């Protein structure tokens, strides 16, 4: 492969990268720490730029900057520096039938509220939810909101498809601090698994920091198994490109 060139795709044009990456996703756990759903979650910010790397006219990698990190799928030979490890988990999904609806209009504000409560630094808003769902990856998105017995939003999870017979991904999920330890997070994971399976997903994967032992335990309780632990992404030296 010759030196690949990077094509920077803004929000309206990111579909080329989403489609390329979706075509690469297998039925089992993906070999890279990047899924079309990761692009979809990043595209809640309309200023997000996705990288499509080309060898001639052939896509060889898809990448994006995620905070101080650079995550990619495919083949790249660039100057990287490892960062702390993440745990990779996977759950195969059996076909299911029945009605597994997406969020209703009445659920949207509460889905956003759960996310903000679960992560103290979250900047998620209804406007960013709308941008995420309207993005070139939005058609791959499906969400579940679990409510407590009194109707209060307890746990929410966002799942992303990659196509029929392919592995889906969870990005993100969170439980309201006041509702933790009551089984709502596990219920959300089980329901999103059924919802993704009903739409043709063969399995579902998720990544979480190795330091998040409670999160790993939660995923295990919902039937996920650890498939590996490695650096999810890298620091990219832009000056070396």
Image (cartoon, rainbow, N blue to C red):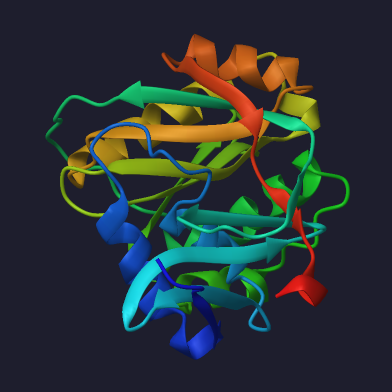
Q: Residue at x 72, y 23 (%)?
A: 210
Give x and y (percent) for residue 111: 60, 52
Against 135, is 64 above or below?
Answer: above
The quadrant the C terminus occupies is bottom right
Snapshot quadrant of residue 84: top right
Q: Residue at x 64, y 60 (%)?
A: 78
Q: Is residue 183 visible?
A: no
The quadrant the N terminus occupies is bottom left
Snapshot quadrant of residue 15: bottom left
Numbered disc total:
0
Against 153, is 2 above or below?
Answer: below
Against 158, is 224 above or below?
Answer: above
Judge from the rendering whether residue 200 lies leftward or rightward of residue 233; answer left or right. Answer: left
Q: Is residue 33 visible?
A: yes
Judge from the rendering whether residue 67 lies leftward or rightward of residue 106; answer left or right. Answer: right
Give x and y (percent) for residue 97: 12, 34
Q: Residue at x 67, y 22 (%)?
A: 215
Give x and y (percent) for residue 12: 48, 89
- Viewer-proximal residue among 238 and 123: 238
- Viewer-proximal residue among 35 and 194: 35
């Amino acid at each position: 492969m010759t030196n690949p060139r990077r094509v920077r795709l803004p929000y309206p044009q990111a579909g080329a990268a989403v489609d390329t990456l979706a075509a690469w996703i297998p039925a089992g756990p993906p070999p890279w720490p990047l899924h079309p759903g990761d692009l979809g979650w990043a595209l809640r910010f309309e200023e997000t730029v996705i990288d499509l790397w080309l060898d001639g006219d052939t896509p060889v990698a898809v990448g994006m900057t995620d905070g101080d990190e650079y995550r990619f799928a495919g083949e790249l030979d660039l100057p990287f520096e490892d960062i702390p490890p993440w745990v990779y988990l996977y759950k195969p999904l059996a076909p299911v039938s029945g009605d597994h609806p997406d969020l209703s209009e009445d659920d949207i504000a509460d889905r956003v509220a759960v996310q903000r409560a679960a992560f103290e630094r979250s900047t998620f808003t209804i406007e960013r939810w709308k941008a995420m769902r309207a993005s070139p990856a939005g058609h791959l998105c499906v969400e579940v909101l679990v409510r407590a017995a009194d109707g209060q939003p307890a746990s929410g999870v966002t799942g992303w498809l990659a196509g029929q017979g392919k592995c889906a991904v969870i990005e993100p999920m969170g439980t309201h601090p006041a509702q933790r330890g009551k089984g709502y997070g596990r219920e959300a994971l089980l329901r999103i698994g059924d919802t993704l399976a009903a739409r043709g997903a063969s399995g579902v994967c998720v990544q979480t920091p190795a330091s998040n032992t409670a999160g790993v335990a939660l995923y295990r309780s919902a039937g996920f198994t650890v498939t590996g632990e490695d650096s999810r992404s890298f620091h990219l030296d832009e000056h070396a490109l």
